[in-house]
Image: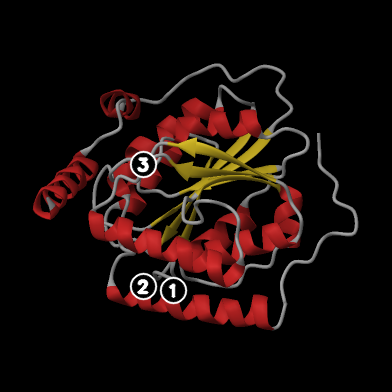
Amino acid sequence: MVILLLARVAQCDREAVTSKPPDDVDLQRICSHEVNMSPGEGSPLTISVFFPAFNDAESLRVLIPKTMETLRTLTRDFEVIVVDDGSTDNTPEILQDMRGRFSSLRVIRHALNRGYGAALRSGFQASSKQLVFYTDGDGQYDVAELRDLVAHLTESIDVVNGYKIRRADSLHRRLIGWFYRGLVKVLFGIRVRDIDCDFRLLRRPVLDVVHLTFSSGAICAELMTQVERAGFRIEEVPVHHYSRLSGRSQFFRWGPVTRMAWDVVQLWMRLVLRRCGADPPARRQVPG
């Protein structure tokens, strides 16, 4: 029985790794020419979208046109930012080509790879709109599901956080993710169900309150711990998770994992032991 169970787990693991977004062929078609759509009329939304990216050239070739297509159904007032965290592949060339196609695309480049958290901090700092959305540049989420997040951002909600319906990663990555989520919940008392689902929509006042310092993946725990502590209201929305469109993850290596583990310890000492970080605002105002 145990052998059969392990065989089934291995089969599911292979299916998760090889699965592709259902509209991958259509995305490639969109990427082959400049998308020319009519922007949504009369929407009051202003949205910054950014992607931290490291050696994600082929994914960005698909992701950026899809993002433009999605945003133009939501609002006229948007910007798309890619934070190139010192890529060594042809990401700079792909981004240069995309900038020629889309005037609303901005690129921030780190000369050296500074880490996932550093890329997020650069993206948050560069974002200028009232709503800020980010997800990873590897294409493991369908950016079109941003529409679902926007639909759940009612006047009483400050952050819409995605959670993965089913994680399309290898078995050992799913186990690491399960352990990390449990550890963060115990250490910081975080209530959000999927801390490492980087598919988030935040209002500008949230970013004005939280103080982000880490350059590793620990920044997600740093962000959401302060969001919950400050009393901002969170809505959680299920989102699909797919295998990478290309390339390999740069996170699940000994160096980044060790660095993040140490940062989590430091974060616990700062936020829990010394009780530093975001405090509840005197008066929280939610823009209409």
**For the point 63% across and 28% down, which residue is it?**
151
Q: How is the image coloured?
A: secondary structure
Question: Residue 92: x percent and y percent?
Answer: 36, 53
Q: Secondary structure at mark 3?
A: loop
Amino acid type shown at disc 1: Met
| Crowdedness near tag 3: few (<14), some (14–19) or many (≥20) residues, C-alpha within 10 Å | few
Q: Which mark is residue 133?
A: none
The answer to whether the residue labelled 3 contacts the one labelled 1, judged by CB atoms less than 8 Å apart, is no
Q: Is residue 114 left or right of residue 228?
A: left
Question: Residue 284: x percent and y percent?
Answer: 85, 51
**Which-is-in-front pick, marks 3 and 1?**
3
**For the point 51% across and 56% down, which residue is it?**
195
| Crowdedness near tag 2: few (<14), some (14–19) or many (≥20) residues, C-alpha within 10 Å | some
Q: Which mark is residue 257?
A: 2
Question: Is 213 drawn above or below residue 47 in the view shown?
Answer: below
Q: Which mark is residue 166?
A: 3
Q: Secondary structure at mark 2?
A: helix
Amino acid type shown at disc 2: Val
Q: Which numbered disc flags the more N-terminal residue, 3 or 1?
A: 3
Asked whether 215 or 221 is in front, the reply is 221
